[in-house]
Image (cartoon, rainbow, N blue to C red):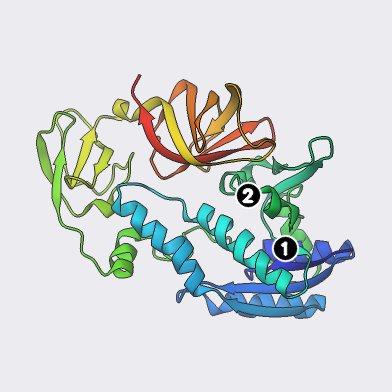
Amino acid sequence: MAKLAVAMSGGVDSSVAAYLLQEQGHGLLGLTLRLHPWSDPTDEKDAAAVAARLGFDHRVLDEGEAFCRCVMDPFAAAYEMGRTPNPCIACNRHVKFGILLERARALGCDGVATGHYIRKSYDAAAGRWLLHTALHPEKDQSYVLYCLTQAQLAGSEFPLGGLSKEEIRAIALEQGLVSARRKDSQDICFIPDGDHAAFIRRHTGRNYPAGDFIDPEGRVLGRHEGIVRYTVGQRRGLGVSSANGRLYVTRVDPADNTVTLGENQALFSRTLEADGINFIPFDRLDAPLRVQAKVRYRQPAQPAVVEQIGPDRIRVTFDSPQRAVTAGQAVVLYDGDLVLGGGTIDRTVEE
């Protein structure tokens, strides 16, 4: 059996992942990443307690500099460009399955294991690792893992993909793991108060000037408080009233420091283009392909056609218009439970 480094957050998922891998006969090393100053010290304490109870070594790795470079800096820069990034995708791509995998191998491990709800398999005929959605859709995390490369998949294990949250908590209670009753984390880990605009101001040391809210024809509707506070589809916190009903953010334009507001119908679009693409079962698309696709984490996948229009660019056309397709978010492609890959949304395309 392989020796695996288990990425241990102190939560119940990674704790049970460690227990299950140990039951399968793997040798384990627990690794907890210290990523930013807002980390809860309880996380490291609980991870160490679980490792001690199960009888394997545990270490804390300080990767704050790498996390800042790979996740927090791009997060702030994306908002400055009028985009809405998903930092969990960047963290998985560069930190958890990049830097952590390198550190694990340097410490004598064959690969890493995590508590993500996802499944993988190997297609011997094609010689490729495949990624599948979790058995229980309500916990599926494929949206933030579409970016994994063949090398990263080869060195990763996901023991929780076939289990429900209830089953995992039951295992943790049965084994007396300290994390059994810990609540799931919901917020972006480095913004515990949920105020992303305040984080960006602190992180960059910059103040973002007020500017105009405008309507689609360019008429001024009011003043905004800095573009990093807004994202496409946002309704709350605008402070602008309209005789035509509710207004939503439809565009954030850093070039002229404006935020465009419109009616709900203006948020719908059928076609998008994405770059930064990654495919899993194949290297590229040679012809248009029918898929299911989603443009946000909890959205049910929708029928669409994808075609590759450049070395690092795809166009996705949905059968039905989708609401609030947002630059900076991911579009993730599926064939049933098979994760085909995806990319970062660059823009919507007018028909």
Q: Note whether residue 178 is visible.
A: no
Q: Is residue 105 left or right of residue 349?
A: right
Residue matched to label 1: 112
The part of the image, by quadrant, that contains residue 30 is bottom right
Residue 143, percent from left and from top: 57, 44
- Residue at the image position 40 percent from the left and 35 percent from the top: 325
Q: Which residue is drawn at 66% across and 40% down?
A: 280
Q: Is residue 211 visible?
A: yes
Q: In which quarter of the view is residue 209 placed?
A: bottom left
Quarter where residue 306 is shown: top right
Q: Nearer the viewer, residue 311 or 130?
A: 311
Categorize mark 2 by other alpha carbons within 10 Å: few (<14), some (14-19), many (20+).
many
Q: Which residue lies furthest to the front in this view?
A: 311
The CA span between labels 1 and 2 is 13 Å
Q: Is residue 5 left or right of residue 40?
A: right
Above or below 218: residue 153: below
Q: Residues within 10 Å of mark 1 (few under 14, many from 20)?
A: many
Give the image location of residue 256, x and y in percent. 16, 45
Q: Which amino acid does label 2 sit on?
A: Leu
Q: Which residue does the numbered mark 2 point to in the structure image? A: 148
Amino acid type at circle 1 is Val
Query: Measuring 72% from the left and 49% from the top, which residue is drawn there?
Result: 164
**The N terminus - image quarter:** bottom right
Element assignment for label 2:
loop
Q: Residue 86 carries which label?
A: none
Query: Label 2 near label 1: C-beta < 8 Å?
Result: no
**What is the total number of numbered labels drawn onto the structure image?**
2
Q: Quadrant of the C terminus?
A: top left
Residue in front for this viewpoint, 299 or 75: 75
Asked which secondary structure carries label 1, the reply is strand
60 displayed left or right of 251: right
